[in-house]
Every structure is written in structure tokens, then in C-alpha cells.
């Protein structure tokens, strides 16, 4: 009797120790599996919309800079709405250059991560401008701010005043990436 | 009913033909890890010309037995596809005549020649108020600050017989205006 009374507490202690070891082993296994097989990160997405063609028309005053600015919607799911933007022109080596078939007319591109701007950060072809922040709360700015950035196209007087007569055209591609 | 459909289709096709969007138009980005959009940029540059590098012409103490002539290099720039231009000269005399004057003394006629290359001492004779066409510039910069230093020659002359009719010790003045236009 006395011996049975002594045996029971020993069995209880052993079972408790086994449970603790099992719990610890399970936790370690869970940790190791999380480290070894991490869940895929949620891919942050972006979108650029509301782009309009740029028409300078006939530039009669070649002694002054010509400028066109437009409001654009850039939306980013990244924390703080961060994104980068990369511009590429249709000139040689993605340069910002228009052509009339035989002659080139250079232009400059500026970007502001606020709408309604007529100046911004100067962009270099194929070089990402990082650290941009979007205030857009909807993919196409259908709600919230109606636009979240400004695209500014500039033709400088020195280029214009040396340009050959003619009609020039080209395209500009903008690539937005989440940051 | 069938006829109506055909008419509507034809009208739609016609409308599409007349209201067709430009071949290149802006594109909008889609929602993704990156998003890309594009715009078309168009601009037209009008024909422009510029004449510069002009210097005043002074004939002083000239020998009246020979024609007095002054040639100067001028910069004419044109941005047309052929770099072509026209030039029109007018004097300050009656009816834009090329004449110099001093008060009531008889006016003194002079002649003007133009060459579309620099370094010339003769060229095409200009008639006051009459446009000389078919000129071509080699200038690559508006004021010839780079490229060729000049692209044309202006030659002003006073014939010996005219010089012999002028009063000695008297200064005659006049103005010559040159108008260049793209061609």
C-alpha cells in the first residue's frame, strides 16, 4: 500500500516531463520549419494610369522653354505608398528625343510625386528614380485623390532654337515598381 | 431589318474611319508588381532664319578713280530642311533705293551684291526691294558661334564715276536693310 502510494507521484512527474519535452520539441520543429520553409511574401503591387499624350503643337517661340505638365495616377500597395519610376524615351539608347525622320529634337522629363506640379525631379533614361511616395488610395484614383503625381515634359530653348523645321514625334514609356 | 443592320454597320465603319484615333496613343498600366504606361509626344518647329554678324560700312578717303568696294562676312542661319532662305535688301533712299545722302546734295547711288558663301568679293546683284531666292546656308548655329564662322558675303560698292561726282570733304549717309526669310 505504502509502496503504491509512493509509485503514483513518480509516474505523474514522468508524464509531465514527457509532455514538456514534447511541447518543446513541437515548438522547435515549428520554428525550424518556419525558418526552412518561409511562407511567400505578399507581392506589393503598383499601377500607373491616367496618362495622356503630349502635344506641344506649333512652337512659335523658339527662344523660350516649352513645357507640358499632366496629372497622373500612381498607386502603390507598398508601405507608405512607396514606389520607383523609370522612364525610357524612343530615341537612341532610350534617350528622351523626338524625331522628324531625319533630325532629332531633345526633351527633358521631370517627375513629381504630387499632382499639379510644373517642376519635379529630373529623370534620366532607364535610371530608376527611387523613394517616390503615392497618396493614391485607389488603383485608378477613382476615389480618394484624383491624381498622385505630375509628369512634366520640357523642351529647352537651346534645343528648340537649333532645331530643324518639321513635325517631331516620339514616345515615352514609364515603368513603376513597388518599393 | 437586314438592310438597316447593313446601313448601321457601314455608318459605324465610316465613323471609325473618320474618327480614328492617332496610330500612337497613350497606354495605361495594369495592376502588378510593376506597371508600365506610355505617352506619345508631338511637337512642330516652324521655319526660322537669322541674320547676324553685320558690320557698318565706311568708305573714307577713297580713290575716286577706281570703284570703292567693301565685302564683309555675314552669318545667315536657316532651319529649313534644305537650309534655304531668301534675302531682300532695301536702301534708305526714295522708294527704298540704294543711295547715300547729305542734305540737299544729289544722292549717291551704291550697289549691293550677295553671295551665299563667306569670303567672297562679288556675288549676285540685289535690286532694292526685290527678293533673291534660292540661297542656302551652311551655318549650323544661329549666330555662327559654332560651326562655320560665317555663311554669306555682303558686298557694297560705289562706282568710280559716282565717286567722281561726289563733293569732297562731305559725309554721305544711308542705311541698308536686309530681310532674310525661310525657303
Image (spheres, coloured by chain):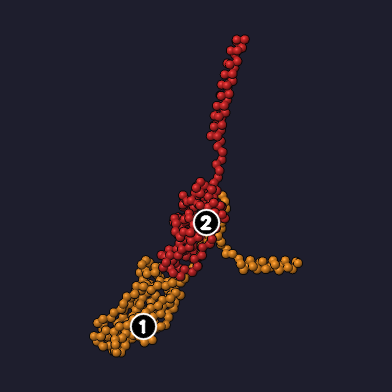
Chain colours: A red, B orange
- Circle 2/circle 1 CB separation < 8 Å: no
The answer to whether one can see residue B60 in this image is yes
Total number of numbered discs in the rendering? 2
The local secondary structure at tag 1 comes to strand
Residue carrying label 1: B91
- Choose between A83 and B172: the one closer to the eye: A83
CA distance for labels 2 and 1: 60 Å
Marks 2 and 1: same chain?
A: no
Q: Residue at x 54, y 29 (%)?
A: A28
Tell me the crowding category of disc 1: few under 14, some 14 to 19, or many 20 or more residues within 10 angstroms, Cα based. Answer: many
Q: Residue at x 48, y 59 (%)?
A: A116
Residue A85 in the image: above or below residue B11 = above
Q: Can you tell which mark lies on residue A112?
A: none
Q: Tag 1, which chain?
A: B
Q: Residue at x 38, y 82 (%)?
A: B90
Residue carrying label 2: A147
Q: Nearer the viewer, mark 2 or mark 1?
A: 2
- Choose between B139 and A162: the one closer to the eye: A162
Amino acid at each position: 500500500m505504502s509502496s503504491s502510494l509512493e509509485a503514483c507521484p513518480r509516474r505523474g512527474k514522468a508524464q509531465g516531463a514527457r509532455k514538456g519535452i514534447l511541447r518543446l520539441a513541437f515548438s522547435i520543429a515549428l520554428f525550424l520549419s518556419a525558418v526552412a520553409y518561409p511562407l511567400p511574401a505578399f507581392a506589393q503591387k503598383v499601377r500607373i494610369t491616367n496618362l495622356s499624350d503630349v502635344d506641344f503643337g506649333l512652337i512659335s517661340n523658339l527662344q523660350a522653354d516649352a513645357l507640358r505638365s499632366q496629372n497622373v495616377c500612381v498607386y502603390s500597395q507598398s508601405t507608405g505608398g512607396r514606389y520607383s519610376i523609370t522612364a525610357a524615351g524612343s530615341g537612341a539608347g532610350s534617350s528622351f528625343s523626338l524625331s522628324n525622320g531625319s533630325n532629332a529634337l531633345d526633351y527633358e522629363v521631370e517627375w513629381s510625386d504630387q499632382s499639379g506640379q510644373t517642376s519635379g525631379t529630373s529623370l534620366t533614361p532607364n535610371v530608376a528614380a527611387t523613394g517616390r511616395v503615392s497618396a493614391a488610395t485607389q488603383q485608378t484614383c477613382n476615389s480618394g485623390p484624383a491624381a498622385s503625381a505630375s509628369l512634366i515634359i520640357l523642351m529647352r530653348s537651346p534645343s528648340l532654337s537649333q532645331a530643324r523645321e518639321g513635325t517631331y514625334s516620339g514616345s515615352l514609356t514609364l515603368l513603376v515598381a513597388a518599393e | 431589318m437586314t438592310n438597316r443592320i447593313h446601313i448601321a454597320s457601314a455608318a459605324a465603319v465610316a465613323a471609325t474611319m473618320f474618327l480614328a484615333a492617332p496610330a500612337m496613343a497613350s497606354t495605361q498600366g495594369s495592376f502588378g508588381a510593376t506597371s508600365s504606361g506610355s505617352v506619345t509626344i508631338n511637337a512642330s518647329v516652324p521655319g526660322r532664319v537669322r541674320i547676324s554678324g553685320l558690320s557698318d560700312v565706311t568708305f573714307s578717303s577713297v580713290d575716286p578713280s577706281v570703284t570703292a568696294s567693301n565685302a564683309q562676312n555675314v552669318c545667315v542661319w536657316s532651319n529649313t530642311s534644305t537650309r534655304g532662305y531668301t534675302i531682300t535688301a532695301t536702301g534708305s533712299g526714295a522708294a527704298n533705293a540704294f543711295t547715300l545722302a547729305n542734305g540737299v546734295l544729289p544722292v549717291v547711288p551704291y550697289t549691293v551684291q550677295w553671295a551665299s558663301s563667306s569670303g567672297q568679293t562679288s556675288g549676285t546683284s540685289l535690286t532694292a526691294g526685290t527678293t533673291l531666292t534660292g540661297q542656302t546656308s551652311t551655318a549650323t548655329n544661329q549666330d555662327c558661334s559654332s560651326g562655320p564662322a560665317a555663311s554669306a558675303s555682303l558686298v557694297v560698292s560705289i562706282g568710280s564715276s559716282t565717286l567722281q561726282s561726289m563733293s569732297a570733304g562731305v559725309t554721305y549717309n544711308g542705311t541698308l536693310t536686309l530681310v532674310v526669310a525661310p525657303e
